[in-house]
Amino acid sequence: MKKTKVLFGIVAIVAGMALIAGCGSSEKPAAQTPAAQEQATGHQGHSATMPKEDPMPIMKDMDKALQDVVKQVKGGQMMDAQKSAAQLVSTVDKVLPHMMDDGLEDHLRKTAKDIKDSVNSGKTDPSALEGKVKDMQAIMKETTTHLQSMNH
Ligand SMILES: [Cu+2]
């Protein structure tokens, strides 16, 4: 009577261990595969790390902010121009998570910051700013094309 109880206990433990081992070996790879696939496809289109939003309206806001900067600097409204330049940088920050081209991303960020620094310095040379604005417009055009190449 006592011996069979112990034996039964051992069988139960062994069965339990086999069950745990079975779970570990069969379910883990199955759970890993879809995650790995999701990551792989994510890099081709809209990555999972991106905010769930359409970046095109942000590009429009960016274009508007840049036009405001130009208009306000020309009109001598430096306080307004500084606000618009800050808006320009903030729209750039919003669009950066959507970009998958490090070189372009860097160029966009640097040019926007350059415009902001130049406007904030107060001694804005209109012709120098014009060059930066032209750079910015070219990079924004490139960015729009880049963003349109992926699914949002
Ligand atoms: Cu995106």
Image (cartoon, rainbow, N blue to C red):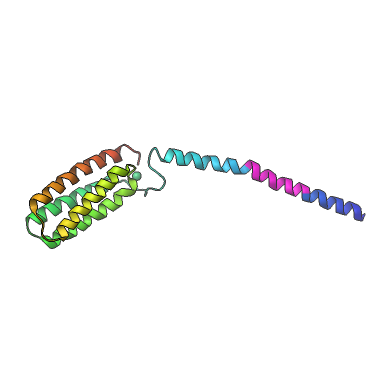
* Ligand 1 position by quadrant: top left
Q: Quick check: 83 left or right of 24?
A: left
Coordinates of residue 6 in the picture (x, y in percent): 86, 54
* Position of residue 20 measured from the top left corner of the image (x, y, whole percent): 69, 48
Would residue 19 be counted in the magenta stretch? yes
How many numbered marks are there? Answer: 0
In the picture, which quadrant includes the N terminus? bottom right
Q: Do we see residue 61 in this rendering?
A: no
Above or below, comparing residue 118 to residue 18 in the picture: below
Q: Is residue 100 visible?
A: yes
As drawn, which residue projects farthest toward the left? 75
Q: Main secondary structure of the magenta part?
A: helix
Q: Residue at x 25, y 47 (%)?
A: 108
- Judging depth in this view, the residue of 131 and 68 nearest the camera is 131
Name the quarter where the C terminus is drawn. top left
Residue 147 percent location from the top left of the image: 30, 41
Residue at 58% from the left image edge and 40% from the top image edge: 30
Q: Which residues are magenta?
A: 14-26
Q: Is residue 151 left or right of residue 37?
A: left
Q: Residue at x 19, y 46 (%)?
A: 136
Q: Residue at x 31, y 36 (%)?
A: 149
> Which residue, as the protein is rendered here, is positioned at the far right?
1
Give the residue furthest to the bottom: 79
Image x and y of residue 46, in percent: 38, 42
Q: Relative to 79, does residue 142 appear above or below in the rendering?
A: above
Query: Is residue 47 a member of the stretch shown in magenta?
Result: no
35 with respect to 128 (left or right): right
